[in-house]
Image (spheres, rainbow, N blue to C red):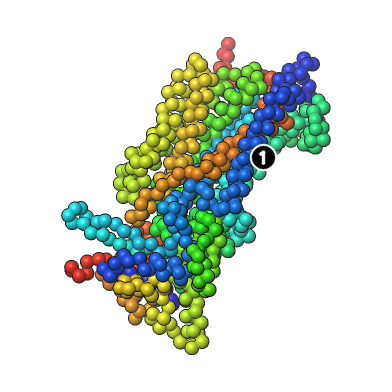
Amino acid sequence: MLERESTAGGTFLDRALLNPIEDTNRTFYYVVGALLLLFLVAVGMYAHQIWFGLGVTGMNQPMTWGFYIVNFVFFIGISHAGTLISAILRLSMAEWRRPITRMAEVITAIVLAIGGLHPIIDLGRPDRVMNVFTAGRLQSPLLWDVVSISAYFTASTVYLYIPLIPDIALLRDRGAKPQWLYAFLAWGWQGTPHQHKVLDRAINILMVMVIPIAVSVHTVISYIFSMTLQPGWHSTIFGPYFVVGAIFSGIGALLVVMIVFRKVFHFEAYLKEIHFAYLGNLLLLMSLLWFYFTFSEYLTGFFGHEPFEMKVFWYKFVGPYAPYFWAMVACNFFIPVVLLTFKKHHTIPKVLVSAIAVIIGMWLERLIIIVPTLANTHLADPVGIYIPSLVEWGLFLGGIVAFVLGFVLFSKFFPLISVWEIQEGRERSVKDVTERLQRYLPVHQQHA
Amino acid sequence: MTRWGMVIDLDKCTGCGACIIACKEENNVPYVSADEAGQGRALSWMTIVSEVVGEYPNVRGKYVPRLCMHCDNPPCTKVCPVRATYLSDEGIVAQIYPRCIGCRYCMAACPYTVKVFNWYEPEWTEGMDRVHNPDVSLRTKGVVEKCTFCHHRLQKAREKVRLEGRDFVDGEYTTACADVCPTKAIMFGNLEDPNSQVSHLARSTRAFRLLEDLGTEPKVYYLAEGEKNA
């Protein structure tokens, strides 16, 4: 056990994982500069919106919610990539998780922060946001969101940080700069057996805790909609439907991130085709599950043929939102199912295309859930029209830029693939798995 | 007990729109440019939903004045995260403008789409900016507003009633739209008072409420058209 911190055969095998930190190249600074510039543009647009009011968006009556709420649901959905997938993989003792969990957890922490800010961007009076705490009504589904998102954010940042400690200590010992940062964050890690025991226990507790919190987050986000009486929203299936969609889009985002950083930082030795094949299978499974939920949701609405429900239904199926609706079905179901079923050859390109399709498709789904219901009011009003403004597009882009920027900055300071877990896998996995396997196998009593 | 409510006789309504104007003047509801109004940003606490009914040659226009229904089971107050909208003891669904954070959840939840939002800082045309009703507070950009059943008139009437130590007389407290309606299609009063005009009409066989099956229990009653043909 004492040898766990040392390197196999005396040489450090995982230099490639620390390269982005120790040998930062010039491109990194250009990328960060460009992203910062784009981000500042988005900040400027938000300042413009604060100054003039929400009139600078494309929202109106009855289209009281638009891109901000769509993106809120979308980003929070993506955040389920992380913690949930990493927790489930750890819990099921999937050995192939080792190079994946870190990236998944980083996605969660960054995207959750971005998504959590979206309802505030959407406020008419952001200066009064503290009213939610001083005058909050716990009966309002929005308050449920505040509670569960802050719980999830706390849990998932801790869950990111705890398994990061041995790697921070490694960087501290290798003299990475700024030294004070690593010395502080390493929290006195020396790699003693006792510390490893405590770390393992902390991770075990967290991964169990994080799963119900993650499920609750997207469930209560769906409750924002399903608790109202509006056609297309008032549905009991929404909680699990949103959770499935969230995990679905989360895996998509995780795959894209893995493929991009594998290419950029040359992690080919760590992220192999088999990882993409396995995660691709998971994506395929979620795609089928997504279709099942979508089918149930719309068939129930159609069969009852309630007039208000049907207004929204036709608006999506053959009306102005038909192109988006059918694009969503193609992106979330047909493309991934076809590509991921036959992925023996060209696994990575096929997985990449499916993952991108799923991300687009899931964004469309959020749009399709929110806009058509608002556009078709109960009374004989003209059908609402929502055309997002430049500011809304700008802030959408700003959200994506913030995500990429956060990820790039993280990669500068911390390894994107857990070094100690890879080492641990190299040293122990084969033995552990062999032992575990032998316990599954039937025991044949030898009778002489 | 008091439950303020309204009855609108659709047989008497001509769709003239006087109620809309009276409401705007009474409650300091801001103007928006024609351009903005075309984009669905018109601020109006009272609107007239017009519908063409039937097929040629048997067509006719149908006008339904629509305002906040002051539901007894309001979907909007339930979702408000900060209690900036609530149901008062006398059945009025009220707004607290200085507390509203502008999340517009109440607007999304209202099945009658009667809540409006200040997309910009409110503006009035030259001259109109000097004749605000002093009894009604002005709103800022970024908050939701809607019909209050001219709540400020209730406050005034209540003062008087209390001073004179008596009960409300039917018609003593009424809204600006009811006041101005040239055909007296809009009537206002206490639904709990068995002798009031509104409680009498609300019990008539012609009375109905919008989207009654949603269970929101609106306190705005309509009298169905066609009495004269019956």
The residue tagged 1 is A157
Residue B3 visible within the image: yes
Q: Residues within 10 Å of mark 1 (few under 14, many from 20)?
A: some
- Disc 1: host chain: A
In the visual, does B93 lie left or right of A269? Answer: left
The structure residue drawn at horizontal position 64% and vertical position 22%, both measured from the top left corner, is A264
Q: Specify the amino acid type for callout 1.
A: Thr
Is A66 or A92 nearer to us in this picture?
A: A66
Is A286 or B104 nearer to us in this picture?
A: B104
Q: x, y (%) of residue A409?
A: 69, 33
The answer to whether A352 is drawn above or below residue B63 in the figure is above
Q: x, y (%) of residue B119?
A: 51, 55
Q: x, y (%) of residue B149?
A: 44, 70
The structure residue drawn at horizontal position 40% and vertical position 83%, both measured from the top left corner, is B169
Q: Residue furthest bottom?
A: B164
**What number of labels is visible?**
1
In the visual, does A374 lie left or right of A22? Answer: left
Within the image, what quadrant is residue A12 found in?
Answer: top right
Q: Residue furthest front?
A: B126
Q: x, y (%) of residue A29?
A: 70, 29
Within the image, what quadrant is residue A428 found in?
Answer: top right
The structure residue drawn at horizontal position 48% and vertical position 29%, both measured from the top left corner, is A357
The structure residue drawn at horizontal position 44% and vertical position 84%, both measured from the top left corner, is B167
The answer to whether B56 is drawn above or below residue B140 in the figure is above
The answer to whether B171 is drawn above or below residue A276 in the figure is below
Within the image, what quadrant is residue B114 found in?
Answer: bottom left
What secondary structure is marked by label 1? Answer: helix
Quarter of the image where the N terminus of chain B is located: bottom left
Is B150 or B18 nearer to us in this picture?
A: B18
